[in-house]
Image (spheres, rainbow, N blue to C red):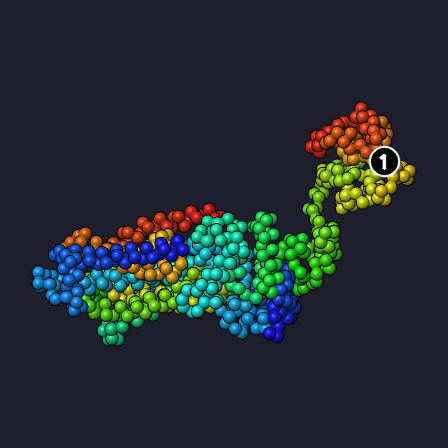
Amino acid sequence: MAEPGLVLEGVTAGYVGAPVVRDVGLRVLPGEVVGLVGPNGSGKTTLVRVASRALRPRSGRVSVQGFDPYRIGGREAARLVAVVPQDVTPAFSFTVLEMVLMGRTPHLPAWGGGGPEDWARARAAMAATQVHHLADRPIDELSGGERRRAILAQALAQDAPLLLLDEPTTHLDIRHVLDLLGIVRGLAAREGTAVLAILHDLNLAASACDRLVVLHGGTVVAEGVPGSVVTPSLLRSVYGVEADVAVDEATGLPMVRVEPPPARPPSVGRRAHVVGGAGRGAPFLRRLTEAGFDVSVGVLHASDSDATAAERLNLVRVSVPPFSDIDEEAAGACRALMLAADLVVVCDAPFGPGNVANLRLALEAAHAGVRTFLLEGSPIHERDFTGGQATALWSELVGSATVVRSYEELAVEVR
Amino acid sequence: MRTAVRFRRVLLGLALALVAAFLLGVAVGAVWVTPWSTIRLVGWKLGLVDRPEDVARSAEVIVFQLRLPRVLLAAIVGAALAASGTVFQGLFRNALADPAIIGVSSGAALGAVLVIVTIGAGSLGAFGVPLAAFCGAMATAILVYRLARIGPTVHVATLLLAGIAVAAVISSVMSLVMSFSGEEIRNIYAWLLGGLVAQGWRSIATVLPVVAVGLAGATLVSRELNLVALGEERAAQLGVEVDRLKRRAIAVGALLAAGAVSVAGVIGFVGLMTPHLLRLVIGADHRRLLPAAVLGGAILLILADLAARTIIAPSELPVGVVTALLGGPFFLFLLRREGRRAGARG
């Protein structure tokens, strides 16, 4: 076979008007799982339709196992390409077994039913997708996830060397998402099936695919192993989002971390200074910002997740390098911020020798008349890693500050 | 499998019921002819037994000249209508399709009437009228399909509206044609209402080959109709040449409806009720549904015709009136349920 798997070369395709995909080149080798990612409307489904013989490209070349699917019959093409569509809603109430047996259609003679081989294939497909116990159930009585798995079984029964999946994981719970991707990877490894899957979840795509192809505005903008493709700059240019990409130490795979941008109401003209640490401050930074406060934070260690949160929110912050104590310079800067603030919020962070100075600064501010709030989610002695020093400072603070248990209580106090 | 076992049982039950309905249809009338006499008379005609001496000569005439052809015709027409309904329901992906409701029967009738009025029923040979009916049915089916389809789906509302609109146009054209038909108008009118009145063996000889070809065609498209029920794009992904299948299915559905209409006029609701009820019992697989609907449709029309000629005996109701009395409420019930389901979907 000259060209096993799927080859697209210079494919331009669309419906009426301007083409949806332009000059796209793509290759999926046997045994390879390729993820097709990109924002909504980037042309992913159009490309899958081109490969599945549903949309003849205006120009360019399509090859499946060396054949042009548009030059062979529908039956022959269906023996080469199996598709798992987003959803199938039958007009009549077929049973799961009947549905899965329909996957054997391209292998059946023009007239007559399936033989033992077809039944065996259908049963194997149902067992693989865990719908065998539903064989006699009408498909319209199944849950969304069960129906998706029955449709996957239908496509598996087709027994084709190229499998195209259009967002196969929507409506599935996390266990069935993992099962489905496991089945697909197993198929590629054991049968040498070439797999092209449209996936929306980048982390899932990175972990399930050997290679990713990123489509944006109808063209391929990046391609390669997940680690080289999923980068902050790509997320910014393609999706327009700011995201952190960490590398999972156990697998070496990229992990995207995103959160919805905070609401930015008009400023209330007051500034809150937050003493955080170990991520305890991050929710307060976000919610105070969303409530219209100007927010400052410090002193933090630069590696602390509170520092990352403050950076994303673009807040005024005082920080020191990781694992170092708070030096005079940082303390001075922070003291100035606290004394000029309208309120100081001390979060229930753990306190050790590296950050106990923050409590001293807060005490100074409280004594100077700045409204100070202590968040006491857990008792101080559980968070004291200074041998009693932090507990003593905290107790003194309680005398001149207001103790709150949650952001909601704080919000009531400062309204 | 469970469904396969049930299918065999249902098919056997329907076959027995058909034999019973057949004997009943022959037995009942102004003169009662016992089923046993009928069985022996038929056996004698087939050369299996000697002529039964205790059966009167008049009974022999009644059975062979009147009732047997009539019941046989009812069975053939009922089977054809049910099979046509099955094919159209599969093609339209809609359980409310029926050759009469979607206007195909009216189209067939117009084709037939045009030939009868313009050049005479017999001038094109035995198959002239069925052929004209087929052309009319085919044209109507294509037209309604085009009108009813919005994007990839055929909605209930558009299908019914398209059917009603097309049937209304056809019926006014038909009135126009009939006003030029002179003395034949009464016969044509009686035929249009749907009747199996005393047609004799000649009608059977005409309609049987037409329906046989139609049933063979329906059998050939039945498996792929299953896949069309999943949506046209999905059917294509699974290897069905959808456009070719649609052309074939329309031709087959139109041929079956045309065969029925050309001998019995417009008889509604047999093609709606039969596949619908049987689908509830044996499931949606058209390969099973089709033979079951053929038997069910035959039974239904034999019994409907029996009612039509006995309720106000010695006069007769058109059999189309009886099926409409049965099927109308059934149709309204389905329409209401379908509407409620669509409402629940959103």
User: Callout 1, which amino acid?
Assistant: Pro
Residue A128 appears in the figure: yes
B48 or A248: nearer the viewer? B48
Graded by Cα atoms within 10 Å as few (under 14), some (14 to 19) or many (20 or more), the crowding at tag 1 reads some
Q: State the image coordinates of residue A6 (x, y, percent, origin top left).
A: 61, 68
The residue at the point 64 percent across, 70 percent down is A10
Q: State the image coordinates of residue A408 (x, y, percent, origin top left).
A: 69, 32
Q: Is residue A387 above or below residue A7?
A: above
Q: State the image coordinates of residue B312 (x, y, percent, origin top left).
A: 17, 52
Residue B145 appears in the figure: no
The residue at the point 79 percent across, 38 percent down is A277
Please state if B256 lies on the left or on the right of A274 as rendered.
left
Look at mark 1 in the image and give the residue it sits on: A353
Which residue is outermost to the top? A399
The residue at the point 61 percent across, 70 percent down is A4
Which residue is outermost to the right? A328
B177 or B317: nearer the viewer? B317
